[in-house]
Image (spheres, helix red, strand yellow):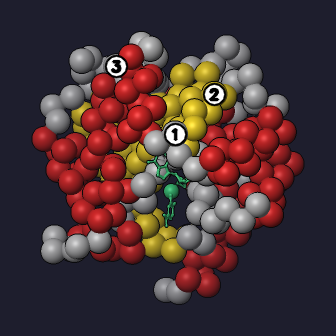
Amino acid sequence: MTQEQWTAVDRYITEVLVPGDAALEAALEASAAAGLPPINVTPNQGKLLMLLALIQGARSILEIGTLGGYSTIWLARALPAGGRLITLEADPKHAEVARANIARAGLADVVELRQGRALDTLPQLAAERRGPFDLIFIDADKPSNPDYVVWALALSRRGSLIVIDNVVREGAVADAGSDDPSVRGVRRMNELLAAEPRVSATAIQTVGSKGYDGFALALVTADR
Ligand code: SAH
Ligand code: DHB
Ligand code: MG
């Protein structure tokens, strides 16, 4: 199996099942033009996020790690009238590009982007009594994943769904001796999820145009 095959299959799946969308394509073009790294979710994964939000019946969504707002737009598209999405981004340039992309997608009134390090903005959300969120997508700096899961749980209710991106890291996650801070973050996050009585969690390996990685799902099964 090769990267070329994974990319070809992602292209095929996207062509057949994920119709082109002007706002999403414009968001990627503007992100590339501004020099943002091309680490957004793929179109087929973006659609998975939208479907998860629809299955969940999500009316409130929290995203940690906006980049250019590509996954944000996918998630926000699942919201019913009156639904809200809050997205957290540390990098001011990413935030600026994302704001423009979100506005171009017609979602400026639905999405609230908070610029700042998530470990600063998450406590603010809690202090403002925002939440509980129906769906939380964690996709920022991976070493902080354990902290983000703790905050996600604090901002959850029974039935909330937590989705965590990039949890396989080309298989490195299975290496207990890894000194990669991202791998260590994912492993500590998994241990935390395993020990947390309020969640039931699993993870799935994926291949695709972004290589070999995976995502985790954690369903919150009890109120705080
Ligand atoms: N969810 C996006 C991709 C996010 S990439 C998509 O799929 O389209 C990860 C993002 O997290 C980057 O934009 C990075 O600047 C941001 N980030 C990194 N550290 C952060 C932190 N401490 N707080 C908030 N955002 C952070
Ligand atoms: C990276 C971050 C992501 O969210 C992703 O999906 C892929 C790569 C990164 O930081 O390299
Ligand atoms: Mg990611």
Which residue is drawn at the image coordinates 66% and 28% (left, top)? Answer: 111
Identify the mark nearer the N-term, 3 or 2: 2
Which three-letter amino acid code belongs to the residue tagged 1? Gly
User: Disc 1, ligand 1: is the CB inside 8 Å?
Assistant: yes
- Among numbered discs 1 and 3, the one appearing first in the sequence: 1
Write the residue at 53% across / 46% down: 90
Between marks 2 and 1 in the image, the one whose residue lies nearer the viewer: 1
Label 1, label 3: how far apart the Cα atoms are:
25 Å
Label 1 element class: loop
Q: Are marks 2 and 1 in contact (CB under 8 Å)?
A: no
Q: Is residue 1 visible?
A: yes
Which label lies toward us, 3 or 2?
2
Say whether marks 1 and 3 touch (CB < 8 Å): no
Mark 2 residue element: strand
Residue 197, numbered circle: none
Return the mark for residue 116.
1
Q: In the rendered image, which residue does mark 2 sit on? A: 112
Which residue type carries mark 3?
A: Arg
Identify the disc placed on residue 157: 3
Q: Nearer the viewer, residue 185 or 118?
A: 118
Q: What is the CA distance from the residue labelled 3 to the residue labelled 2? A: 21 Å
Q: Position of residue 86 (x, y in %)?
A: 56, 29
Q: Position of residue 83 (x, y in %)?
A: 63, 19
The C terminus is located in which quarter?
Answer: top left
On the image, the x and y values in percent for residue 42 come to 62, 59
Identify the residue at horizontal 60%, vertical 72% (top origin). Answer: 209
User: Residue 56: horizontal and vertical position, in percent?
Assistant: 49, 28
Is disc 3 placed on a helix, strand or loop? Answer: loop
